[in-house]
């Protein structure tokens, strides 16, 4: 490719080197456009990227005002045949940039390029230039796609927790200069596990997408929304004049949950709990602010569902073991850590089996079996005991319908 020792070949080699180094795509495309205008005298070159069904200028060499006006018209062209006709009508060579999968990613436009006057070598070099430009655009698209996957939640397409943590840290640093507060709202969907169990995981995923969409629509300019994992979302509120703003906005969000969500044929009433925290300029680190919002959400769920709680120092005084237990308990249903054991009920005089009692056990992967005496009171305090009870009833019926033989079941004697 462009193997001669001509200036054109040197410029082409520079473009390939930029591509190999992963430099910004506009620099590579500028080098490619510089090569293109050397194919014939008095030509100008533009390279346009295709994004969202529209062409946008990415690089240009020696462009005139009249050229730019024509490029505006090209951006409205929708088919390859129309592009070719447009080029002939305006004395321009329009070359599509196609991937190996025949996907159109952009075009090269060379103004005042006359194909009839071009030698075979120039035509070959033009094709090679198109290949370099295509590779550069493909590389750019791949980097953007990977960056998107790293920073976004694949289900809701919101920012993910890892990226939000970076944004929170940068926002707190900027707050030291602006002198304004930063707010954080942590949102937990109440009894989400029940929706998953009753309607299926696909319906649960659809519900999360609808919740994400509604939260997005309610955001004010400058606010950021992320899915922090499972059934939790987080909202970052920078440049606040009042530390009470997060609590007030969370109350607004709670009222917006009153409107049902339509998942398939089901009209669902969803409740959410909210924990808020506020940091003054230079007051807290990102991790501290997140821990405060987390503690406030735990307190809200402990009191009752659908509550808004703002962090206060008293919330941080709970024993660390209790906080760890609460946190693990909230995700025990979602992670399928609960198990049912069956205790037989026997008629003493007749000696025959008359029934069974379903016993709930929690087997944590690292903590092992946790006594019901430890986690049942906590479940009652944080408001998830009904959700757990519903799961026990549902799971017992499911196992019965599945035809599990009680005689071969694992019995727990008490």
Image (cartoon, rainbow, N blue to C red):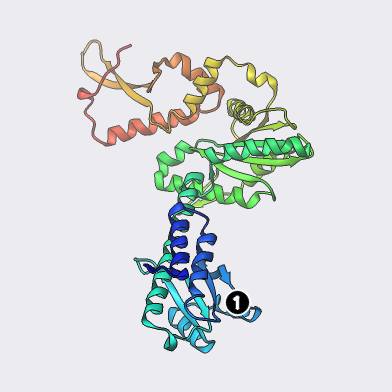
Residue drawn 42% across the image and 62% down it: 135
Q: In this view, does 382 lie to the left or right of 176?
A: left
In front here: 214 or 154? 154
Q: Quadrant of residue 400?
A: top left
Q: Is residue 114 above or below residue 275?
A: below
Residue drawn 63% across the image and 28% down it: 296
Q: Note whether residue 120 is visible.
A: yes
Quarter of the image with the N terminus in it: bottom left
Q: Is residue 273 left or right of residue 335?
A: right
Residue drawn 74% across the image and 35% down it: 176
Q: In the rendering, at what x and y percent does residue 304 appear?
A: 60, 29
Residue drawn 70% across the image and 24% down it: 312
Q: Is residue 328 above or below residue 48?
A: above
In front here: 118 or 411? 118
Q: In this view, does 276 lie to the left or right of 103?
A: right
Q: In this view, does 51 lie above or below 218?
A: below
Q: How many marks on residues?
A: 1
Residue under label 1, please give it.
72
Q: In this view, does 239 lie to the left or right of 334?
A: right
Q: Note whether residue 54 is visible.
A: no
Q: Is residue 390 above or below residue 369?
A: below
Q: In the rendering, at what x and y percent does residue 377 appear?
A: 51, 18
Quarter of the image with the C terminus in it: top left
Q: In the rendering, at what x and y percent does residue 380 appear?
A: 53, 22
Helix or strand or loop: what does disc 1 sit on? helix
Q: In the rendering, at what x and y percent does residue 4 appear?
A: 38, 69
């Amino acid at each position: 490719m462009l193997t001669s020792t001509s200036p054109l070949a040197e410029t082409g080699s520079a473009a390939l080197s930029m591509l190999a180094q992963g430099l910004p795509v506009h620099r590579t495309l500028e080098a490619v456009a510089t090569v293109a205008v050397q194919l014939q005298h008095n030509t100008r070159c533009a390279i346009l990227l295709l994004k969202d069904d529209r062409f946008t200028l990415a690089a240009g060499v020696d462009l005139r005002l009249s050229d730019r006006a024509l490029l505006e018209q090209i951006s409205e062209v929708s088919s390859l045949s129309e592009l070719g006709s447009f080029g002939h009508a305006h004395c321009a060579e329009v070359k599509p940039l196609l991937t190996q999968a025949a996907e159109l990613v952009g075009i090269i436009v060379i103004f005042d390029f006359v194909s009839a006057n071009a030698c075979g070598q120039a035509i070959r070099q033009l094709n090679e230039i198109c290949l370099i430009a295509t590779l550069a655009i493909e590389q750019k698209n791949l980097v953007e796609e990977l960056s998107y996957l790293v920073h976004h939640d694949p289900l809701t397409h919101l920012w993910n927790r890892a990226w939000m943590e970076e944004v929170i840290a940068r926002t707190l640093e900027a707050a030291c200069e602006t002198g304004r507060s930063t707010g954080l709202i942590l949102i937990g969907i109440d009894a989400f596990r029940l929706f998953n169990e009753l309607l299926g995981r696909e319906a649960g995923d659809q519900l999360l997408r609808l919740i994400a969409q509604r939260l997005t629509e309610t955001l004010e300019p400058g606010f950021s929304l992320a899915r922090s994992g499972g059934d939790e979302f987080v909202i970052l509120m920078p440049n606040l004049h009042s530390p009470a703003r997060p609590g007030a906005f969370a109350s607004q969000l709670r009222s917006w949950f009153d409107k049902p969500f339509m998942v398939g044929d089901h009209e669902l009433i969803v409740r959410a709990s909210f924990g808020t925290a506020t940091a003054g300029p230079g007051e807290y680190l990102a991790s501290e602010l997140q821990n405060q919002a987390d503690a406030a959400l735990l307190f809200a769920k402990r009191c009752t569902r659908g509550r808004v709680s703002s962090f206060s120092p008293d919330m941080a005084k709970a024993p660390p073991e209790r906080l760890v237990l609460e946190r693990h308990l909230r995700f025990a249903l979602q992670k399928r850590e609960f198990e049912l054991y069956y205790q037989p009920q026997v008629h003493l005089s007749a000696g025959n089996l008359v029934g069974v009692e379903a016993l709930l056990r929690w087997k944590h992967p690292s903590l092992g079996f946790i006594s019901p005496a430890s986690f049942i009171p906590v479940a009652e305090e944080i408001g998830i005991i009904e959700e757990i009870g519903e799961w026990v009833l549902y799971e017992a019926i499911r196992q019965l319908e599945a035809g599990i033989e009680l005689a071969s079941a694992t019995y727990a004697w008490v």
